[in-house]
Image (tube, helix red, strand yellow):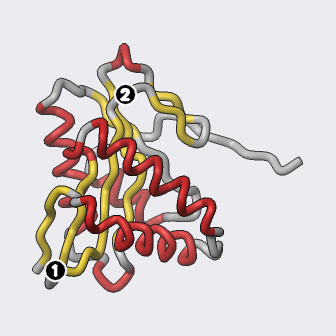
Amino acid sequence: MFKTSFFAIEHVSELENLKKLCEIETGWDPPQEYLNEWVKTMLGIHHQDPKLVKVASVDQKIVGYCIAVKKLHNYEGVVMDVTWKSAYIWDLFVLKKYRNMGIGTALINDAIAYLKSIGVNKVGLSVNYWNENARKLFEKLGFKLWSYFLVKRV
């Protein structure tokens, strides 16, 4: 069985390792500079409000995380307007071995419950076009298509 909890600073390296595994799973081995920036951003979000960073554990091992942001945020071209009382799921990942156990659902539902408790009434996220399983999960949880984000290599 898993449990969700708030992230504790002493587990930074565990979260960094999970992020690296997340990126490797997509076919990209991220450079340390990228991971350093990710950690810096995650810690900034945590400093803003520690309840925005949740982790899931099995046998005291972190197997997933969900990181939300509640202020104006621009991520991959998505800008959530603070006048909407909105928030954004910035990052979500669960190790492959622990998927389909309800961990991702629990992490998102925990994040949304907290965001709702602080006055947020709209939560956004983005999902890669090729990540069909994640898209289905998000739709099952009530997320609807809002826009398309297109990219062109030049």
**Residue 29, image x and y in percent?**
63, 75
- Residue at horizontal 17 percent and vertical 33 percent from the top: 116
- Mark 1 vs mark 2, CA separation in Å: 31 Å
- Residue at horizontal 37 percent and vertical 49 percent from the top: 43
Q: Is 48 left, or right, of 20 in this rendering?
A: left
Q: Quadrant of residue 2?
A: bottom left
Instruction: Name the amino acid, label 1.
Output: Gln
Instruction: Name the amino acid, label 2.
Output: Lys
Q: Secondary structure at mark 2?
A: loop
**Residue 10, image x and y in percent?**
26, 66
**Residue 81, image x and y in percent?**
43, 21
Label pair 1/2, CB-CB below 8 angstroms? no
Question: Up-down: is 124 above or below 35?
Answer: above
Question: Up-down: is 77 above or below 33?
Answer: above
Question: Disc 2 marks which residue?
Answer: 71
Residue nearest the observer in this picture, 37 or 112: 37
Q: Quadrant of the N terminus?
A: bottom left
- Residue at horizontal 39 percent and vertical 43 percent from the top: 44
Q: Secondary structure at mark 1?
A: loop
Q: Quadrant of residue 15?
A: bottom left
- Which comes before the other along the chain, label 1 or label 2? 1
Q: Which of the numbered marks, if any, corresponds to residue 60?
A: 1
